Image: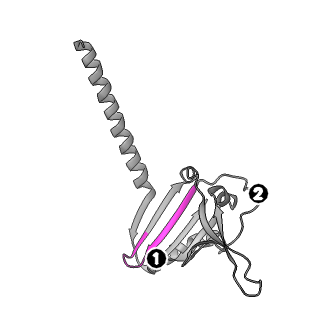
Amino acid sequence: MTKNQKTVLFVVIGVVVMLIVAVAAVGVFAVRSMFDNIATDQATATKTMDDVRAKFAHAMPVLELQPGGVTLSRRPPDTPPPGKLKTLHVLHWSVHESRLSRIEVPFWLVRMRDSPIDVIYQSDPDAGGLRVRTPSTVHVSDIERFGPALLVDGDMPDGGHLLVWSD
């Protein structure tokens, strides 16, 4: 191998290594920009969550947190909404840490998940006062058919609260 070939090879390897480092740095920055943790009191966290609920006119969430898992509280509409969803928002209040965590995930990233989300569908409780729970599978496309919606609004087992919505 000549000296020129070695020089070209080292330059190519150096450029590849720099590109890998740059892609990793951009990836870390992108992921870190999705998360925000704020130390706050419960009153402020409750007000923040109430402001989000007000956007949806206090509508019933699409999914409910149950001790046995996540429950689908209503069926997806037959037709999709006119626009595409852009962001999946998550607010989590941690009682023990007095911390409000905010996560904003671009919906294109959520769409990359091609595996189904397992939930339990609850039928109308008016049928003799019994709640019939049957296993069901929900895909991201089913969630998208609700359009901008309050997806989860429930208490966590540790005493915290979780609020998830899409827009």
In this view, the residue in front, 64 or 29, is 64
Image vertical order of residue 79 relative to residue 7, above or below: below
Residue at the left extreme, as displayed: 3
Residue occupying the point 47% across, 79% down: 157
In this view, the residue in front, 64 or 55, is 64
Kindly identify the amino acid type of the residue bearing the numbered disc 1: Thr
Q: Which is the main secondary structure of the residues drawn in magenta?
A: strand
Image vertical order of residue 160 relative to residue 25, above or below: below
Query: Which residue, given by chain and number where applicable, does mark 1 sit on?
Result: 44
Image vertical order of residue 106 relative to residue 61, above or below: above
SS type, badge 2: loop
Check the picture and name the quadrant holding the N terminus: top left
**Residue 121 position in % (x across, y down):** 67, 72
- On screen, residue 27 versus residue 3, left or right, reads right
SS type, badge 1: helix
Query: Which residue, given by chain and number where applicable, does mark 2 sit on?
Result: 79
Disc 1/disc 2 C-alpha distance (Å): 37 Å
Image vertical order of residue 77 relative to residue 154, above or below: above
**Where are the magenta residues, as a range?**
87-100
Residue occupying the point 32% across, 24% down: 12
Residue occupying the point 53% across, 51% down: 109
- Report if residue 93 lies within the magenta region: yes
